[in-house]
Image: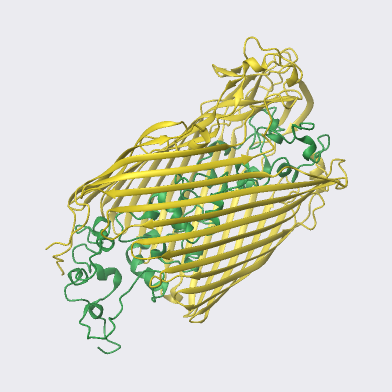
């Protein structure tokens, strides 16, 4: 075969492949959405190229091999694949172009050349990344710092498998800076915490702007996933006349002079409406 | 056309159902957080999944933890290429404290004190406290129900719709303040949020276009929180009221698309979204105190309105075979057009302030431009660099105009398909036009304070990653180190610095075809410094926060190819501690360390008893302990002016042992056709 000739497909399609590749992990594709005969868009749909729809022409790979001769390679989709990621992904995007909407292009996954197969298991009957309770473990393969954070004592229930990364982030895009599912950080948080959306009569300025000013959504050592412990977190911004910003130290502990500014809910002992108040007398966020 | 005579296409039904019982050794409500195992004793549980396929129609279902408060049920169906639908229901139990005690009883919307309650000015005078305290767990249940569908009219046109209803009910903690005192209240919550997401997608040539509507409607069944104050109160101020989170809604229309061209393999993607949020809950009166003449409200409800605009455009191209570039611009605007009025506050339902105060509807506009280039210098070497410019304009705040310039670079060296080394680093500088001290003073704020989200900041950051991974080799290894140093060098009061370090190590080893093991470790350290002023002048105290967290994980999966069992072992450990040192007027004091320790072990085994039946065994151990000075040794009456709920830090050791069976319906293994 000359270098400029078209690569050849195998003589018998999948029947050729299954002569060797007959393990359950491979055959599981017949329990996936990729092997629906009646859907002509799928690799095993009528008129399609079966295994070679994704793995490319396999004529040479499936051909006879002389003793001592190395079998010709075929397109693989794993981390050790020699095929450039962009070319690997083209096999998928040939059909799944619509799944890559606005947000994918120029996003971190696109620019860092993440392969579709890095996250998706195209042969599996159930693709783990599409199941909420399994998804985070797939994401954590790369996002290992977030895996550590998810183990913190105060975190969203990702460790328990009751919330997935996709609840907030859109792996295929998302239009905000950190690929969030909604247009802005707060809009994403309001997806589950709509009670904080307001607008309130008395707004707390950072709340209206960015929940992340006070909360670390990936997990924290502090209740409420706060980025610092109260009252110091509040004292990072507030030093009011008539309500002095007094240093809170060990003298305010129960065995000394218990301080209502330090213990219990700290500043929130009184300013409970820290996300905003809709009470006409609530300008100090106490009603 | 190839026929594929050996392909094991499946028509019919295939599923597995796992049923069993789990014994939980001890009761601790916190162990039930997100798991549902909040009591000791026996639990019955069912899990499973299944698929039905026939003539191109495919329906699947999945059930997790059906017998627990953390249950998940999903159903999906489709005639692929034509239509699809999905239904989902899941619950998440939020279990916060089981050690809390209160004197309040909930009755007809009011938190009532016991009939024999004796008010006092401070908690040590509550003569009936001890006899009145009752355990009240702080817990709530989240429920999510979702239904949706998709209709594929043609290759070029598709319609989709999702509707979801989210509920949350239970009890959380809210404080209720009176004059100089407060009580932590076990507040009833009863929220419901309906959301709809509907869109049409067009395929035009090499591009896609999506027109979508998103609506979210929040309903709080409780308009007000009413409680009897346990403290001595002036006449008329014994029953107090605070506003609850108001009903609100948000609607948004968006148009987004991405178009590809052959010219430089470029892609132009854009998104335009315009939304409006509204809130019009009726106001409560200025005070519930009948002895204070009620002033008229400027209007009966907020008639609050926030308009949002979000525009974004991204252009990526490959002008040369080895060069990829990206240009992006994003614009976000929150315009709070709620009318401003003057309000006459009654302080803690006792003192009319005698002043009129205007409400402040905050708005902001944020824009971001970014440029990035990626050059494949050699086959094994890629170099990237980028520049971002952020601009943020606000009103009513100390800083009106804020900019941030970020420059970064990255080198990726991949000498072999199984090894990659990546280094990334950069700097950013956040500038402000000026910190308007007049605004700060008008808010009663110390003019030296620099709020950290408004302050000048210089940041240096870097990350190093090494990865060894090859499917042909049994070992994969990865290590990442990240560091970021923030300096707020122009802040005299407030946060002055924050240094962060994170690292991870990850090792997995495929010992044989049957056995694989993994080991992982991660850590994080944040040191933050702040300055404060008790004298309302120059800084006279500072605090240093050391937040540390470390995580270990290890596991084994043993699944002999033709074996009789499948075994998984997973262990994880998380240790957190926070040290806070406070130096006030030269006197140093350290608060006790805030600590947390989590050990979690799980062993799962399936014994393949027969072709259709597995016997399953599941052993879990979890230990969780915290030490938290904010609540440790803080009984209901420890604080003279705050009646607390007396919550204790977490401390449990629990075993959960489960046995059951998994039954397979339909062919368990796929067999090639003869």
**In the rendering, at what x and y percent does residue A160 appear?**
46, 45
Classify residue B413 as left or right of residue A73.
Answer: right
Q: Quadrant of the C terminus of chain B?
A: bottom left
Q: Colour of chain B?
A: yellow
Q: Would residue B61 be seen by someone viewing this image from the given angle?
A: no
Q: Quadrant of the N terminus of chain B?
A: bottom left
Image quadrant of residue B418?
A: bottom left
* For residue B273, above or below residue A258: below
Q: Count numbered badges in the picture.
A: 0
Image quadrant of residue A64?
A: bottom left
> In terms of depth relative to the viewer, which is nearer, A195 or A219?
A219
**In the rendering, at what x and y percent does residue B280 appear?**
57, 31
> In terms of depth relative to the viewer, which is nearer, A180 or A228?
A228
* For residue A209, above or below residue A22: above
> In terms of depth relative to the viewer, which is nearer, B655 or B94?
B655
* For residue B581, above or below residue B346: below
Q: Residue furthest bottom?
A: A2
> In terms of depth relative to the viewer, which is nearer, B360 or A242?
A242
Q: Residue at x 22, y 65 (%)?
A: A22
Q: Colour of chain A?
A: green
Classify residue B600 as left or right of residue A215.
Answer: left
* For residue A132, above or below residue B217: below
């Amino acid at each position: 075969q000359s270098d400029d000739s078209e690569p050849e497909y195998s003589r018998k399609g999948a029947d050729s492949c299954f002569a060797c590749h007959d393990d359950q992990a491979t055959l599981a594709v017949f329990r996936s959405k990729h092997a629906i005969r009646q859907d002509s868009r799928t690799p095993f749909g009528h008129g399609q190229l079966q295994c070679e729809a994704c793995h490319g022409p396999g004529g040479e790979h499936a051909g006879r091999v002389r003793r001592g001769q190395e079998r010709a390679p075929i397109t693989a989709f794993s981390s050790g694949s020699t095929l450039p990621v962009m070319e690997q992904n083209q096999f998928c995007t040939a059909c799944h172009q619509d799944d890559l909407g606005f947000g994918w292009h120029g996003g971190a996954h696109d620019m860092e050349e993440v392969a579709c197969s890095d996250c998706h298991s195209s042969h599996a009957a159930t693709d783990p990344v599409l199941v909420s309770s399994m998804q985070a473990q797939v994401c954590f393969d790369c996002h290992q710092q977030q895996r550590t954070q998810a183990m913190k004592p105060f975190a969203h229930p990702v460790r328990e498998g009751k919330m997935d990364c996709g609840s907030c982030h859109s792996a295929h895009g998302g239009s905000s800076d950190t690929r969030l599912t909604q247009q802005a950080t707060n809009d994403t948080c309001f997806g589950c915490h709509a009670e904080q959306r307001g607008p309130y009569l008395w707004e707390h300025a950072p709340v209206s702007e960015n929940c992340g000013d006070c909360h670390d959504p990936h997990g924290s050592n502090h209740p409420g996933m706060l980025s610092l412990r109260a009252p110091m977190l509040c004292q990072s911004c507030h030093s009011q006349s008539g309500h002095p910003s007094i240093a809170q130290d060990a003298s305010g502990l129960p065995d000394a002079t218990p301080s209502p500014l330090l213990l219990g809910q700290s500043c929130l002992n009184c300013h409970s409406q820290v996300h905003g108040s809709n009470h006409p007398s609530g300008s100090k966020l106490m009603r | 056309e190839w026929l594929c005579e050996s392909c094991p296409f499946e028509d019919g039904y295939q599923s597995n159902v796992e049923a069993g019982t789990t014994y939980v050794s001890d009761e601790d409500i916190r162990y039930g957080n997100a798991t549902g195992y909040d009591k000791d004793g026996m639990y019955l549980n069912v899990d499973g999944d299944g698929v039905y396929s026939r003539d191109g129609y495919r329906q699947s279902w999945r059930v997790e933890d059906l017998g627990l408060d953390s249950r998940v049920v999903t159903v999906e169906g489709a005639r692929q290429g034509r239509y699809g639908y999905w239904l989902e229901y899941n619950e998440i139990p939020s279990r916060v404290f089981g050690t809390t005690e209160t004197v309040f009883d909930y009755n007809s919307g009011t938190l009532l004190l016991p009939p024999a309650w004796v008010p006092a000015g401070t908690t040590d005078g509550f003569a009936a406290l001890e006899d009145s305290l009752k355990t009240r767990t702080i817990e709530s249940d989240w429920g999510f129900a979702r239904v949706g569908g998709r209709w594929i009219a043609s290759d070029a046109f598709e319609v989709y719709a999702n509707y979801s209803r989210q509920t949350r009910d239970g009890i959380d903690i809210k404080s209720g303040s009176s004059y100089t005192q407060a009580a932590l209240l076990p507040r009833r919550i009863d929220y419901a949020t309906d959301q709809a997401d509907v869109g049409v997608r067009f395929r035009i040539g090499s591009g896609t276009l999506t027109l979508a509507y998103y609506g979210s409607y929040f309903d709080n069944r409780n308009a007000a929180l009413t409680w009897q104050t346990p403290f001595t109160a002036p006449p008329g101020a014994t029953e107090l009221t605070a506003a609850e989170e108001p009903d609100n809604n948000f609607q948004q229309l968006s148009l987004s698309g991405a178009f590809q061209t052959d010219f430089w393999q470029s892609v132009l993607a854009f998104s335009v979204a315009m939304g409006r949020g509204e809130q019009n809950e009726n106001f409560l009166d200025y005070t519930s105190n009948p002895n204070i003449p009620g002033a008229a409200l400027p209007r009966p409800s907020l008639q609050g309105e926030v308009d949002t605009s979000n525009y974004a455009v991204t252009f990526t191209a490959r002008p040369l075979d080895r060069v990829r570039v990206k240009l992006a611009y994003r614009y976000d605007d929150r315009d709070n057009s709620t009318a401003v009025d003057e309000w006459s506050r009654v302080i803690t339902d006792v003192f009319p302030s005698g002043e009129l105060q205007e409400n402040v509807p905050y708005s902001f506009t944020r824009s971001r431009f970014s440029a990035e280039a990626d050059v494949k210098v050699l086959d094994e070497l890629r170099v990237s660099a980028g520049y971002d410019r952020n601009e943020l304009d606000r009103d009513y705040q100390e800083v009106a105009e804020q900019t941030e310039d970020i420059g970064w670079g990255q080198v990726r060296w991949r000498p072999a398909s199984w090894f990659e080394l990546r280094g990334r680093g950069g700097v950013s500088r956040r500038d402000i036009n000026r910190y308007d001290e007049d605004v700060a003073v008008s808010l009663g704020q110390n003019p030296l304070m620099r709020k950290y989200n408004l302050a000048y900041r210089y940041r240096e950051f870097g990350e190093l990653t090494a990865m060894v991974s090859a499917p042909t080799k049994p070992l994969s290894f990865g290590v990442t180190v990240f560091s970021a140093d923030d300096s707020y060098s122009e802040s005299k009061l407030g946060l002055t610095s924050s240094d962060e370090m994170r690292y991870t190590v990850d090792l997995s080893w495929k010992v044989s075809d049957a056995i694989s093991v993994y080991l992982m470790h991660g850590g994080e350290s944040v040191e933050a410094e702040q300055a404060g002023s008790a004298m309302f002048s120059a800084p006279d105290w500072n605090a240093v926060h050391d937040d540390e967290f470390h995580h270990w994980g290890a596991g084994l999966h043993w699944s002999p190819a033709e074996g009789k069992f499948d075994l998984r072992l997973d262990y994880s450990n998380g240790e957190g501690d926070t040290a806070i040192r406070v130096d006030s007027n030269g006197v140093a004091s350290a608060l006790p360390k805030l600590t947390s320790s989590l050990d979690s072990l799980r062993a799962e085994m399936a014994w393949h008893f027969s072709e259709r039946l597995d016997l399953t065994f599941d052993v879990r151990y979890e230990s969780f302990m915290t030490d938290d000075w904010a609540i440790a040794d803080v009984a209901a009456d420890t604080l003279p002016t705050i009646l607390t709920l007396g919550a204790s830090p977490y401390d449990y050791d629990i075993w959960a042992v489960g046995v059951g069976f998994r039954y397979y319906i339909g062919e368990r293994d796929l067999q090639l056709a003869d």
